[in-house]
Image: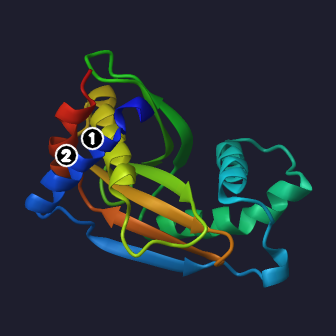
Amino acid sequence: MLEKITDKNTRLFAERRISENVHHDFVVHRTVPVSPSEIPSGTPLVLGREFHDLLYRISDRKPLNARERKLLPWLVTCRDALRENGAGYLEPEVELEAGSNLPRGRCDLMAHGGLAELGIIEVKVVGHLPAEPEDAHLLQLAGYAVLAEEVYDEHRIWAAVAYVSLRERQIRLFVHKGTGRLRGISRHLIAA
């Protein structure tokens, strides 16, 4: 999927999204209950990799190492915010392969239940929380929703971009109650 998130496709997606007035439905903002001394050090890229590794581990019952335990409050806060909005079982790193002219992809989290039958959550670890989601992230999210629609034969899909800022000790979710319009804008851009 990431090979389809080009500057050109992102620009075309943004133009259509703006012209069709497609925006998120609501924002969820949470503060992570840790002290400044508990913030893990590292660049957003390194912290992002470590956070995604921990995200994948939510499905196992193995003990966490010290570094993973430092990241855990952000994961718990993100998971709790999703569950407060109805998300049920959260499945990490779901492979989506439609078998048609669409690329393969792996969404960070798939929620079963919530605002619709399925939810697609794309997690981004950033230095500072954005006021609005980036169009490249929305295109990626919409692409995963297209794939999920094909794979699961499900049209009722909600979606969220979850921004995680370790430095600011906060998370922000930009939530779309439905993805029909996002899928409509992105389908031709991600088709092979």
Callout 1 amino acid: Lys
Give the side of residue 88 with respect to residue 152, left or right.
Answer: right
Query: What residue is shown with label 2?
Result: 12
Image coords of residue 39 (percent x, y): 78, 73
Q: Residue furthest right?
A: 66
Q: Is residue 153 above or below residue 142?
A: above
Q: For mark 1, give the secondary structure.
A: helix
Image coords of residue 176 (percent x, y): 29, 61
Q: Residue furthest left?
A: 20
Callout 2 amino acid: Leu
**Which residue is drawn at the image coordinates 78% and 44% (left, top)?**
61
Q: Judge whether residue 118 can be spotted in this image.
A: no
Give the side of residue 41 with respect to residue 140, left or right.
Answer: right
Query: What residue is shown with label 1?
Result: 8
Q: Quadrant of the N terminus?
A: top left
Q: Judge whether residue 51 can be spotted in this image.
A: yes
Residues at badges 2 and 1 in contact (C-beta under 8 Å)?
A: yes
Kindly indicate the quadrant of the structure image that contains residue 32.
bottom right
Image coords of residue 51 (percent x, y): 68, 53
**In front here: 87 or 68?**
68
**Which residue is drawn at the image coordinates 33% and 27% (left, top)?**
151
**In front here: 40 or 155?**
40
